[in-house]
Structures are given as C-alpha cells and as structure tokens.
Image (spheres, grey):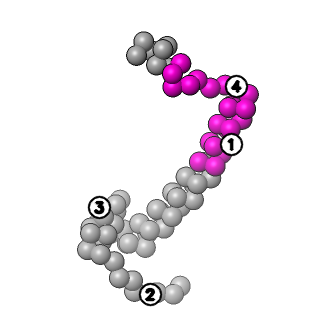
C-alpha cells in the first residue's frame, strides 16, 4: 500500500468526519465506502435509465399534464 498526504479544506475534513460510522473509522475507510457507493449507484442508475427508455418506447408513461388532470390539479 502506498501512503500519501493530501490537502483538503477544513470544511471537507468536517464533512468526512461526520460521515464516519464509528469514531475509529479512518478517512481512508470513509472514502473507500463512498467510492463503492458511487460505483453501485452508477450501475443502478444506468440500469434504471435503460428500463425507463424501454418503458417510454413501449408507451408506458404519463405526461405531466395527464398526471395533473388525474390528480385534479
């Protein structure tokens, strides 16, 4: 493992501190968890977009105007 020093703003450090799951969790662990979440989110988002495109192509959608009418707005 290579260890390096990075410079971050005090505000960023406070944000990372607030994201710790427990007091002894390292910033490395917090960042790794965030990156993993981001990777999963991206894969999930891509799948959701593809599903939405298929629904639109098959006509399975409601316009804003129709939804307002259905809700009586």
How far is mark 4 from mark 2, CA to CA? 53 Å
Label 3 sits on residue: 18
Label 4 sits on residue: 59
The crowd level at tag 2 (other Cα within 10 Å; few <14, some 14-19, many 20+) is few
Q: What segment carries the magenta color?
A: 45-66
Q: Of callouts 1 and 3, which one flags the residue occurring earlier in the amino acid sequence?
A: 3
Residue 11: image location, x then y, percent: 26, 69
How far is mark 2 from mark 1, CA to CA? 39 Å
Q: Secondary structure at mark 3?
A: helix
Q: Of callouts 2 and 1, which one flags the residue occurring earlier in the amino acid sequence?
A: 2
Q: Secondary structure at mark 2?
A: loop
Q: Of callouts 4 and 2, which one flags the residue occurring earlier in the amino acid sequence?
A: 2
The crowd level at tag 3 (other Cα within 10 Å; few <14, some 14-19, many 20+) is few
Residue at the image point whose x is 73% and y is 32% from the top: 57
How far is mark 2 from mark 3, CA to CA? 22 Å
Single out the mark in the foreground, 4 or 2: 4
């Amino acid at each position: 493992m290579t260890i390096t020093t990075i410079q971050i703003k005090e505000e960023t450090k406070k944000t990372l501190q607030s994201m710790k799951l427990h007091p002894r969790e390292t910033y490395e662990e917090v960042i790794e968890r965030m990156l993993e979440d981001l990777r999963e989110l991206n894969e999930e988002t891509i799948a959701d977009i593809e599903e939405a495109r298929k629904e639109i192509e098959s006509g399975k959608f409601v316009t804003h105007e129709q939804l307002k009418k259905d809700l009586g707005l």
